[in-house]
Image (cartoon, rainbow, N blue to C red):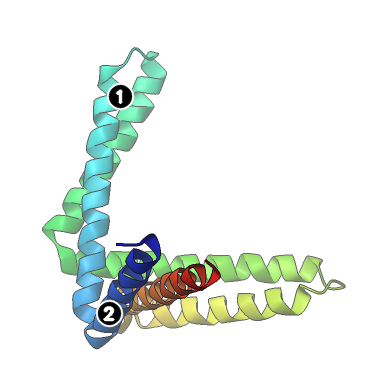
Amino acid sequence: MKTTTIMVLAGLLLLIGGILAFANPFAASLTVELLVGWAFLIGGAVQLFAAFSQDRSTGNRIWFGLWGLLGLLVGISLIADPLSGLVSLTVLLGAVFLISGIVRLYLAWGLKDTPVYLLLLLSGVLSVLIGAAVLMNVMEAAGKLLGILLGIELISSGLSLMLFGYLLRKSR
């Protein structure tokens, strides 16, 4: 099978996954939450192993160990109680949107006389509004937001990969 065909098929699978995420955003949100939990659990375990398996100074070993322990505890917490983890991740995501929007508004203010001013201003306002909306409706957003964002990511990645594979095939 040609590489371009594999790219188009992989893109199609991503596209179908994105559509399924939109069809059931709650299940997609739980999937994201569990994947994040496992990522923290595995990352924390690896960091704990690294902290005690190599010759390091005591200070570095303690920091590596503490960060590893924190990652391990966060992972266990997210996996043990996915619904609470879903709320926690939604609050975190809302805060990220809000803070990144405020930073972009600040940057826009400093770049008033440049061509990027309006784009930064609009982007900042939208991020602040999304962050505020999420934080004001955490319980409602928790069941859908991560799944919708996953759907958007999968669809855009799938379409991009399909288009890239198609254009690559056409250029040969």
Residue 74 appears anywhere in the view: no
Residue 35 appears anywhere in the view: yes
State the CA–CA distance, disc 1 to disc 2: 41 Å
Q: Residues within 10 Å of mark 1 (few under 14, many from 20)?
A: many
Q: Is residue 44 left or right of residue 136?
A: left
Question: Looking at the image, which residue is at 37% across and 15% down?
Answer: 58
Residue 86 coordinates in the image, percent (x, y): 25, 68
Can you tell which quarter of the image residue 1 is in? bottom left
Of all residues, the one furthest to the front in this rendering is 172
Of all residues, the one furthest to the left in this rendering is 80
The residue labelled by disc 2 is 16
Residue 51 coordinates in the image, percent (x, y): 30, 24
- Is 73 situated above or below 167? above
Q: Identify the mark at residue 51; answer none if there is no mark.
A: 1
Q: Secondary structure at mark 2?
A: helix
Q: In the depicted view, which residue is nearer to us: 9 or 121?
A: 9
Q: Secondary structure at mark 1?
A: helix
Question: Looking at the image, which residue is at 34% across and 80% down?
Answer: 148
Q: Earlier along the polypeptide chain: callout 1 or callout 2?
A: 2
Q: Is residue 6 left or right of residue 132?
A: left
Q: Residues within 10 Å of mark 2 (few under 14, many from 20)?
A: some
Residue 164 coordinates in the image, percent (x, y): 48, 70
